[in-house]
């Protein structure tokens, strides 16, 4: 009996150490990624490269993720989840080293594409690992903390870029150092990485067909986050908000991404993923309706809506991960997670051009129309396919 209790205590300690290490690694990586992307854009703009090609360089990384995600489980089966994370992390880190000296546009596209190919594996394994290291009792809070840490890292990245510029130093070494730190944290943890070699024959494309509501959580998060990062401040200026407040509105939206994840995760633990997913969907539908209906005339209320909306958009992603962890395990969970990453990345790629075109055709509320259509589609799918949750 004492030996059993000691063993359970050791397992719980290992789970705690794994989660703590993963959160630290994710935060360091998030800062690096969140600062590297705008640094590359501003560097190319300063060299006179057109916006189209800046967009192509930016899209190369998620395209790489999208292509590699279906093969993640095969890589994990061949090398083990811990080793696969580390070696793919090394490749991703190596693609950053030539950026300062290799100013070729084709070179940058190639490097970012390879970074996406390599980055797909750590992304899928990390989310699967967090699910495996959590119990049904605390999974919602564990996953929510992951979502909050990742969002906080992405939000800190541009501030790190600004800080490096103010110091008069190149920010690239800082971003390389942070990504190296992220990788270094994982090295001693790899012995704790879950075994993900076996699955029940599930394939990513079969997952997408059989779990459309679950995948739609990735789509709404990827579509609205990417679209709002690009166009929410522009929408604010077009409806008459000052430039400063329009930028603040985006910051408030991002703050909701970060600060509301733990309450949403707690609710998912208490009431289950399904009702919280419906709640997120309903609030995501309410957001564009309120902003379309003239809420811009009331800045305090507008900020409150943006804050809650930001939490629900990213919360849908986190709660879907909780639902996946409750239903699947092992290699099958890794395959489902890979399909989820594909859906999120696909939305990241296609949504901003659609939102931008909608704003051109229906100025200024085309963005809100796209957000409403995405939210209604998501909520209807969730409501009609409860069995997925």
Image (spheres, helix red, strand yellow):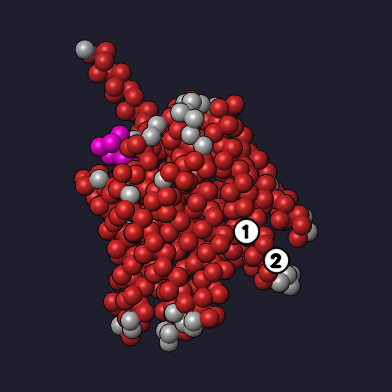
Q: Is 172 covered by the magenta stretch?
A: no
Q: CA distance from mark 2 to mark 1?
A: 10 Å
Residue bounds of the magenta highlight: 135-142
**Residue 177 shown left or right of residue 28 in the figure:** right
Q: Residue at x 53, y 81 (%)?
A: 361
118 lies above or below 237 = above
In percent of width and height, residue 112 lies at 66, 52
Q: Where's the N terminus, which quadrant?
A: top left
Residue 150 visible, this orientation: yes
Q: Are marks 2 and 1 in contact (CB under 8 Å)?
A: no
Q: Residue at x 33, y 70 (%)?
A: 287
Q: Position of residue 59 (x, y in %)?
A: 62, 59
Determine the secondary structure under disc 2. helix
**Circle nearer the N terminus (2, 1):** 2
Residue 332, labelled with which disc? none
Tell me where residue 296 appears, x and y as whole percent.
Answer: 35, 82
| Figure quadrant of residue 140 | top left
Q: Residue at x 21, y 47 (%)?
A: 271
Any mark on residue 53, and which?
A: 2
């Amino acid at each position: 009996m004492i030996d059993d209790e000691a063993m359970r205590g050791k397992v719980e300690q290992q789970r705690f150490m794994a989660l703590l290490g993963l959160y630290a690694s994710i935060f360091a990586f998030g800062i690096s990624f969140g600062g590297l992307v705008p640094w590359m854009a501003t560097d190319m703009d300063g060299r006179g490269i057109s916006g189209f090609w800046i967009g192509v360089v930016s899209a190369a990384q998620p395209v790489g993720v999208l292509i590699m995600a279906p093969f993640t489980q095969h890589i994990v089966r061949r090398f083990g989840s811990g080793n696969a994370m580390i070696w793919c992390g090394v490749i991703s880190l190596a693609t950053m080293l030539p950026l300062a000296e290799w100013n070729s546009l084709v070179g940058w596209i190639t490097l970012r594409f390879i970074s996406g190919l390599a980055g797909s594996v750590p992304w899928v394994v990390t989310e699967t690992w967090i699910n495996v290291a959590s119990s049904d009792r605390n999974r919602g809070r564990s996953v929510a903390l992951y979502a909050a840490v990742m969002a906080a890292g992405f939000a800190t990245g541009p501030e790190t870029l600004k800080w490096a510029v103010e110091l008069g130093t190149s920010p690239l070494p800082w971003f390389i150092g942070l990504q190296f730190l992220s990788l270094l944290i994982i090295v001693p943890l790899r012995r704790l990485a879950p075994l993900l070699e076996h699955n029940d024959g599930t394939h990513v494309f079969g997952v997408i067909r059989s779990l459309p509501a679950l995948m739609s959580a990735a789509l709404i998060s990827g579509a609205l986050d990417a679209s709002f990062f690009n166009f929410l401040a522009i929408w604010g200026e077009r409806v008459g908000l000052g430039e400063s407040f329009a930028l603040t509105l985006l910051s408030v939206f991002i703050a909701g991404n970060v600060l509301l994840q733990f309450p949403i995760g707690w609710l998912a633990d208490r009431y289950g993923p399904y009702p919280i997913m419906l709640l997120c969907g309903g609030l995501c539908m309410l957001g564009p309706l309120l902003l379309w209906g003239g809420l811009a005339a009331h800045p305090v209320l507008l900020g409150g809506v943006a804050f809650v909306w930001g939490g629900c958009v990213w919360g849908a992603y986190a709660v879907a991960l909780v639902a996946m962890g409750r239903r699947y395990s092992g290699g099958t969970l890794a395959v489902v997670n890979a399909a989820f990453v594909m859906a999120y990345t696909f939305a990241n790629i296609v949504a901003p051009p659609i939102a931008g075109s909608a704003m051109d055709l229906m100025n200024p509320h085309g963005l809100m129309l796209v957000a409403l259509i995405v939210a209604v589609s998501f909520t209807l799918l969730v409501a009609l396919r409860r069995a997925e949750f």
